[in-house]
Image (cartoon, grey):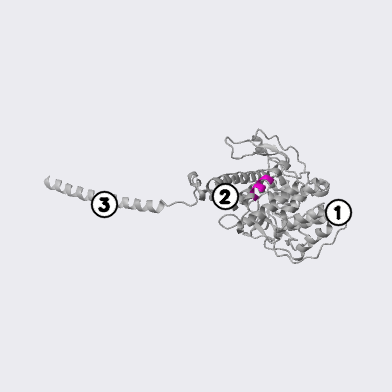
Amino acid sequence: MTSSRILGRRSFGRTAGAVAALALSLTACQEANDRLLGVTDPDIIFPGDLERADGAVALANGTIGTFRTITGGGESTWMFGGLLADEWSTSSTFIQNDETDQRQIQLINSSVTGMLRNLYRTRTRAYEAIESIKKFSPSSRALMAEMYLARGFAEMQLALDFCNGIPIPNNPLANPPENGDQKSTAQVFALAAASLDTGLTFANGTDAQSVLMNRSIRVVRARVALALGDFATAGTLVTGVPTNFSYVHTFSLTTSSNTLWGQGLSARRYSVGDSVEGNARNIRVTNAIPFASARDPRLPVTIPTSGSINGQDGQTYARTTGMWGQLTAVDVVNGVDARMIEAEVALRNNNPTQFLAIHNTLRNAPPKLGEIQPAAMAALTDPGTEAGRVNAHFREKAFWTFSRGQRLGDMRRLIRQYGRTEATVFPQGVHYKGGNYGGDVNLPVTQPEENNPNFKGCTDRNP
């Protein structure tokens, strides 16, 4: 009994000591784990972190990221606008792409819905960043100007691409939230003009970023002036803007790729547009610029003659361009845009000499376009008539600005400002995937917006 109790006490003593040592060891391990795992995650931004200057910069960076999705960093209206126009043809399996190319867009088109939301988001996030910069970093004037550029650009693109009756709140930060009232495209262009005019008041420094913002905002504001028919203001705004300047959106493997490359050359969901369609190239598309078959040095295109380069649909011989690579930066705005505005103003002022000189200066020394450095081109000759000059101008502009979100707006302006008709501007005839081209000349505001009690559908689908 005695020996047993002694043995028992000894056994208990050894066990208690082991447990205590184990507890100490576990505590030390836990403390080590806490040190290793308790680091700050730089990717997580909590609401309180935004209430300071670097938080304002974080909001601005987020805005620029969203801004990128409405240009070359997403399947944006840059691409769908070009599909509805004549820059691209569908080689996709998606009915949303096919019906857009056929100019018969349904109100349930989910792709258009996503593009519309990204335009709204860019505008809202710019508003948020502007308020934060005002409060926490008021000396960041060039950054403030860039936020107004993002806001004005989104408003301009909405008006360029969508129907009359766009629902848009005057203040997307209102509390409680506003249901946007419907506005005509002219009213949305006026919103863009106001945003860009305010941005110019902040882009008045002499540092490189301020100068870049000043030039960028002036060119975008001039595009808005053209859309509103104010040619004199447009010409004044771009005076002195150098041809070699550009404001770009960049890409990386850790953020996003260039979607113009991704949807075109890589996935082959989009085929470069042409005036003849079908694998046998025997279906004539009236009014379409022959982007693929023109063999223009500004837009080199591979035209397959067999199924070796099938589109995503597995059937269409997809016409591809090497203009962009996966990480090729995309010009959101550049000096060529300024020259195109000057040329159109000269055209409107009945000055064919100046009009031709602007175009031929560019053709003689073409700037680089994406991955392409075009060779010099022969000079244009005067077509001799106003109608011929208008045709020449918009064709030249179409090659200089290919798939950068301008073609659809220009085609609408040809009807609105130059007296053309839909039947003489937009693609007509038999569509190579069946049926005939429809009558759409813009993108509709889609069905989900019907949740807004102020939205009653597009006011009209006129250009």
Is 194 one of the magenta-colored residues? yes
Residue 386 got which mark?
1
Q: Nearer the viewer, mark 3 or mark 1?
A: 1
Residue 21 got which mark?
3
Looking at the image, the residue that sits furthest to the left is: 2
Q: Is residue 5 left or right of residue 282?
A: left
Residue 60 got which mark?
2
At label 3, counting other C-alpha atoms closer than 10 Å, the crowd grade (few under 14, some 14-19, many 20 or more) is few
- Type of secondary structure dominating the magenta stretch: helix
- Can residue 101 be seen in the rendering of this structure? no
Q: Is residue 4 left or right of residue 305?
A: left
Q: Are marks 3 and 1 in contact (CB under 8 Å)?
A: no
- Quadrant location of the C terminus in the rendered image: top right
Residue 59 got which mark?
none
Q: Residue at x 70, y 42 (%)?
A: 188
Q: Which residues are magenta?
A: 193-200
The residues tagged by marks 1 and 2 sit, at their Cα atoms, a distance apart of 45 Å
- 100 and 149: which one is in front? 149
Q: Residue at x 65, y 52 (%)?
A: 71
| Amino acid on which disc 2 is placed | Ala
| Amino acid on which disc 3 is placed | Ala
- Can residue 363 be seen in the rendering of this structure? yes
Is 283 one of the magenta-colored residues? no
